[in-house]
Amino acid sequence: MPESVVELRAVQRSFSAGDVKVNALVDANLVVNRSEYVAVVGPSGSGKSTMLNLVGLLDRPSGGTYLFEGTDTNELTEGQRAWLRSSGIGFVFQAFHLLPHRSVLENVLMSTIYNRMPRGERVPAAEDALNRVGLGHRIDFSPTSLSGGERQRVAIARAIVTRPALLLCDEPTGNLDSGTGEAVLSLFDDLRAGGLTLIVVTHDDVVSQHADRVVRMMDGRIETAA
């Protein structure tokens, strides 16, 4: 198994806005190794979300190469990309995206269904994920009865239940107060210590201070990756 989980080689992404070509990502080169915790920072419009979408296999680059665990994703069909995304990548967003009329356990189980995990393994895996985030005692609760921090931890459990190689987080503490946000960051520290690779997009210096490395972006370019 390769040491790197993510490797971008001169990756580009451009869009057409009428007669204007927009270069959202320009010659991006980045290597993220296994068990590394990387924060991606930069102003709005710097290309952070574009890069996150590419790394998460939600979009394809206009040029360059993206290797995920050594696999050239450019050569994959859409079906193969969808499978790799569901099995190898977890997503956590600023909004929790939980189903309000489903229990905490049922929300986490959704990922195991999309992942096609064998039926007999789904509930034990979901319970284990909830225990890892400290919510094993809340499995029968409705998300609407939980605090913001608890809901984000449910979202994290949903993202890690299939044991992905990579966790992608987009402003994961943006809807939380400072104390609750710090608790979520401590959880990320624990997950990283357990071997998970994290890429976190953030505007918050407190979040980036938890990372092993900070990647700074400006005008679609990676300016610093140290």
Image (cartoon, grey):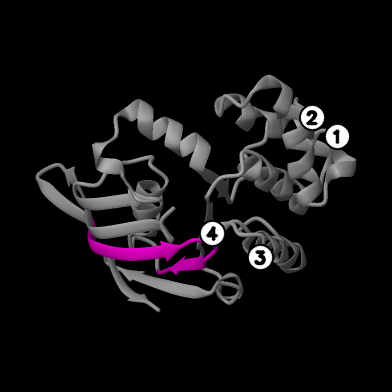
N-term-proximal mark, 3 vs 1? 1
Residue 174 located left or right of residue 63: right
Specify the farthest residue to the left: 19
Which residue is painted at 44% across and 31% down in the image? 83
Q: Disc 2 marks which amino acid?
A: Ser
Segment colored magenta: 24-42
Write down the residue under mark 1. 141
Write down the residue under mark 2. 103
**Residue 185, percent across and down?**
67, 65
**Residue 117, percent across and down?**
61, 27
Query: Does dot 2 land on a helix, a strand or a loop?
Result: loop
**Residue 52, percent across and down?**
41, 52
N-term-proximal mark, 3 vs 4? 3
Query: Does dot 3 land on a helix, a strand or a loop?
Result: helix
CA separation in Å, label 2 and label 3:
29 Å
Instruction: Work out whether residue 96 can be spotted.
Output: no
Write down the residue under mark 3. 193
* Dot 4 alpha-carbon crowd within 10 angstroms: few under 14, some 14 to 19, many 20 or more: many
Q: Disc 3 marks which amino acid?
A: Ala
The residue closer to the viewer here, 84 or 148, is: 84
Do tag 3 and tag 1 residues touch (Cβ < 8 Å)?
no
Do tag 2 and tag 1 residues touch (Cβ < 8 Å)?
yes
Which residue is painted at 76% across and 62% down in the image? 180
Predominant SS of the magenta segment: strand
Pair 2/3: label in front: 3
